[in-house]
Structure formats: structure tokens, C-alpha cells
Amino acid sequence: GIKCGIVGLPNVGKSTLFNALTAAEIPAENYPFCTIDPNVGVVQVPDPRLERIAEIVKPQKVIPTTMEFVDIAGLVAGASKGEGLGNQFLAHIRETDATAMVVRCFEDEDVTHVAGRIDPLADIETIGTELALADMDTVEKNLQRTQKVAKSGDKDARARLTVLEKVKAHLDEGLPVRSLELDEDSVLAIRDLHLITAKPLMYIANVDESGFENNPHLDKVVARAEEEGAEVVPVCAALEAEIAQLAEDEQQEFLEDAGMEEPGLNRVIRAGYRLLGLETYFTAGEKEVRAWTVKAGSTAPKAAAVIHTDFEKGFIRAEVVSYQDFMDCGGENGAKDAGKWRLEGKDYIVQEGDIMHFRFNV
Ligand code: GDP
């Protein structure tokens, strides 16, 4: 699956956050193919649209879509050289598709900071350096190999060499690969390297309950992220862990008392989902109303394949109505009467919030 890795220095609240994220057990029968790995959390994507569709359709079941977070422990200074859990850490983070970096923006004398003081910008530097060093290592090794092949006149190798040299120069400047402009061919040429600093990045600023406003640590992270065009999600991991422990009705009460509309985790999940370039479409039948995940820009047959691989091969057409039209028209029949119910072919690009029926041959 498509996964978002959670990284950060020790004692910043990664496990607290991860445990809160995965506290709500997902009914296994809905996701029979998920491997059970304690570091991977399959998390339901909160989406208020599902309930609104369900109010109209009145299905037997409502099933949200999911995304995966991976708790990637072991990042310390020196990880790129195999310090700590370095090698394991690098292997795990390479397998992810985006990175959520947890930075500590809370003061607490009882919780030791590895560098001895709270300084989120220094932490971001430390982590950035480790990840860049790991990439540098990957690129250098590959560069040597590619040079040999290129000498024999291999055209692909020469093209790859050019890209690798560009990437190396960029990393040498201490910059992450994601900030290097590469054309599509270049991106493809080095995709197999799974460079860590090429993956999209967001920051999760772990603050105290009272630390959402007037928090200089948080302000610094926000300013830094703005320069990079990255998103920051401020959250209080300790509070989220508490909320996650509560039964559903108690949660509601707790949130109301705390003046919160929803758990902060919802913001983390949605930000992660966006960061991974994911979109949601719905199927709405009397049996179930369900949300499904596709890569943004997917065609209708690709979207159908998310439900069942056979749906892609046998795809004939899709019946589509936008979420907004569905709601405005009071459901399927209203949308049909209003002429908002469309037939789309195999080249149709699925839009965020589409409600879809697939027609296919088996
Ligand atoms: P990790 O090493 O990054 O996984 O950090 P942990 O999740 O194990 O947290 C380290 C310590 O910080 C634990 O004692 C947590 O209870 C504490 N902690 C985590 N989040 C918060 C927070 O938002 N505020 C405060 N005060 N402590 C926190």
C-alpha cells in the first residue's frame, strides 16, 4: 500500500502519536489483505461526507477508506552511518511514499531531549542532514556503478549519469532532492533509488495542550515550513493519546469540554492523505456506502481496480455524479432527473468526491 512514514528524533512523541492513531481498531473483516506489522498502522480516513451520503441512501453499512502510517524508529545523529538502529531505519523509510516529521515543540523537564534543549529548527537540521547523508551514500554508490556502464557507451547509463551528477551536486549543498527541479524522465531514471529526501514532507509539531498559540517553537517551525512550501500540523500527542483511550460517547464529551470539533488526529490523517497525493471517491448502494482511495489523476478503470482487479480488465463504463450534485439533488434519482448523472468511459479522470457505479464484463 501507499504509506506515510513517521520520523523524528527520540522523545519527541512519535510513539505517543502513532499509538493514538492506531488506537481505534479497524474491523479486520473489512481489510482482509492487510499484513499485520506492529509498525504499520491502518488508519480510517475521517470524512464527514460519508455520513451525509448515508443519510440519503440509508445503507446497511458505512465503510470509510483507510491509509497507512508507519512508525519508523531509530533516527539518531549517525543513523546514515548505521548508528543506533540506522540500517533498519533506512530500510523502513525507503519503503514509504511520504514523510511526516514529528518535531518537539513542548517543554517538559521530565522528558529528556536528546540534544539537551528544545530547539525544533536544530532538530529539523539534524534529521535533514541524516536523511541527506543516506541519500548521498546511495547516489555515490550508484554513480560509480553507472560510470562504468556509461563508459561502454550505454545510452541509458549516460542519461542516468547526468541526472545522478545533478542530484549529487544538490545534496552536496545540503539540500533535499525534493527541492531539485527534475523533468519526468529524470525522475523516472532514478526512481529505483527510492531517495528519502525526494519524498514529500510535512511537519507534525507536537505541542503542549496550551501550546497552540503564542508558542515560539511552533512559530519557528511554521516559518521554516513556509519557506519550503511544506505543511505543518500542530497537535498535542499526549492529549490525543488520552482522547484515543476513551469510549466513543466519552470522546464526544471530552472534545466538547476542550472546545474541539474533532480529534487533532483527524488533521494529521487528512494532511498525510493529501501529502501522499490521494483522493477519495465513493460507492453508494443499499448494502453499503463506502469511500475508496485512488492516486490523484487516476482513470476510471484504475479506480475500479481498487475495488477489484477484475473490474479494470472488464471495465465498460462508469456512471458518475459529483458529491455536490448528489447532495443538491437529494440522491441518485434526483441526480438522474436533473441530468447530473453522467456516463463516462475509460479515459475519464476520477474527481475528488465522485460517486461512482462501475459497469464491467466478467
Ligand atoms: P518517541 O521517542 O518520539 O516515540 O517519543 P514518545 O512518544 O515515547 O514520547 C516521549 C515522552 O514524551 C513520553 O514520556 C511521552 O509521554 C511524552 N510526550 C509525548 N507527547 C507529549 C506532549 O504533547 N506533551 C508532553 N508534555 N509530553 C509528551
Image (cartoon, rainbow, N blue to C red):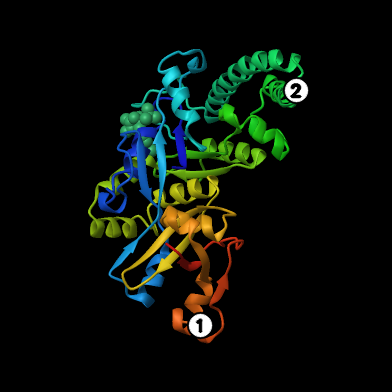
Rendered position, 108 above or below 79: below
Report the image quarter containing ligand 1: top left
Name which residue type carries label 2. Answer: Arg
Position of residue 317 measured from the top left corner of the image (x, y, whole percent)? 53, 68
* Dot placed on the residue nearer the N-terminal end, 2 or 1: 2
Q: According to the image, label 2 marks what residue?
A: 158
| Nearer to the camera, 346 or 240 | 346
Report which quarter residue 195 is drawn in.
top right
The answer to whether residue 246 is left or right of residue 289 is: left
The answer to whether residue 244 is left or right of residue 136 is: left
| Nearer to the camera, 301 or 242 | 301
Report which quarter residue 152 is drawn in.
top right
Looking at the rendered structure, the secondary structure element under dot 2 is: helix
Rendered position, 327 above or below 147: below
Rendered position, 52 above or below 203: below
Any mark on residue 161, and which? none
- Residue at (57%, 69%) from the top-left corner? 344
Q: According to the image, label 1 marks what residue?
A: 336
Q: Are marks 2 and 1 in contact (CB under 8 Å)?
A: no
Camera-near label (2 vs 1) is 2
